[in-house]
Amino acid sequence: MAVPVFRFAPSPNGRLHLGHAYSALLNQRMVEQAGGRLLLRIEDTDQTRCRPEYVAAIFEDLRWLGLTWETPVRIQSEHFADYDANLKRLWDMDAIYPCFCSRKQAAAHALSSSDPDGQPHYGRTCRNLPRDKAIRMIDAGTVHAWRLDMPGHGDVAASVWGDAVIAKRHVGSSYHIAVVTDDALQGVTDVVRGRDMEAATSLHRLLQQLLGLPSPRYVHHGLIFDEDGRKLSKSLRSTALAALRSDGVSALDIRVRLGFGPG
Ligand code: GLU
């Protein structure tokens, strides 16, 4: 049987916190149990939010935690051509369409339902643009996002997400298409990530189906909360690994606190 491939895929838009440590350590433990391989991937397609110093901090924090991973590490911002190629395939098969609506315009055309991120479902105005006109607008450099044509192709993802944006070209952000492309290119067999990503999985499965890519196994683990029961966020200093480290907390303390015990 082929060796299972896991990955930990943080976004460098802040310092890693206890929730990331839990996800990374759980991946590591499952890799050990399965006799698998662990990849680290830097998901920095959203260049408006990601910063190089956070990439260095991810390596530092994970090394301190005792995580080991294969090199070279895949940095998504170096591979936009791969994501564009898959976008083009989806466009050629008419599964996506460019949307030229501003946030305001999209809101004006919104349906009354909304997606798991709280964004109202888009009313599909741009789906009605003739293809040649859409191509002329793209060629003229008009800012656009790419949306999935859900009624034509969706299943369970359709009712959850509506015509989801899978790529925003003008900010170089293409999270959904990038994650699906990379999991396939890197031969990932097991995706272990937080429950906050669970809703996105139906979208990822749909993209895999449309692109003819294999679907990994998915495990969505529980989230780590702070002492007051709030979800951890990158803006909270108190649970950042670097802050805990400078307060004298050891990597072993963290492992024990998160239920991974010594060693
Ligand atoms: N890059 C995402 C994040 O940091 C995780 C995506 C994934 O594991 O698929 O939230």
Image (cartoon, rainbow, N blue to C red):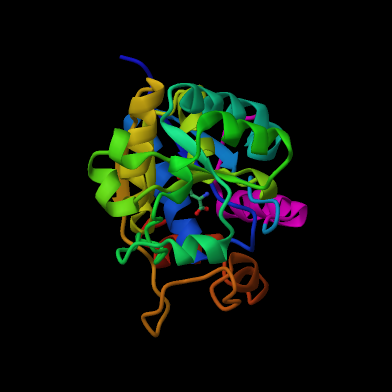
162 left or right of 61? left
Is residue 72 in view?
A: no
**Image quadrant assignment for residue 138:** top right
Residue closest to the far bottom: 228
Q: Between residues 39 and 166, which one lies in front from this camera angle?
A: 166
What x and y, as percent, mark residue 57? 69, 56
Is residue 45 found left or right of 251 in the rendered image? right
Q: Main secondary structure of the magenta part?
A: helix
Q: Which of the 4 image quarters holds residue 2?
A: top left
Residue range of the region highlighted in magenta in the rendering: 50-71
Percent across and percent down for residue 4 are 37, 26
| Residue at the image point whose x is 43% and y is 61% from the top | 109
Q: Is residue 150 visible?
A: yes
**Is 257 above or below relative to 230?**
above
Q: Position of residue 125 (x, y in %)?
A: 44, 50
Front in this rendered view, residue 262 or 193: 193
The total of numbered circles placed on residues is 0
Q: Is residue 176 above or below residue 186?
A: below
Kindly give the residue lying farthest to the top in the view shown.
1
Asked if 43 appears above or below 257 in the picture, the reply is above
Q: Most extreme residue toward the right, as rendered? A: 53
Please say whether residue 110 is one of the residues in the magenta stretch: no
Residue visible at 34% across and 52% down? 161
Quarter that holds the N terminus: top left
- In percent of width and height, residue 173 lies at 61, 47
What residue do we see at 57% from left, 28% from top?
A: 132
Magenta segment includes 51: yes
256, 81: nearer the viewer: 81
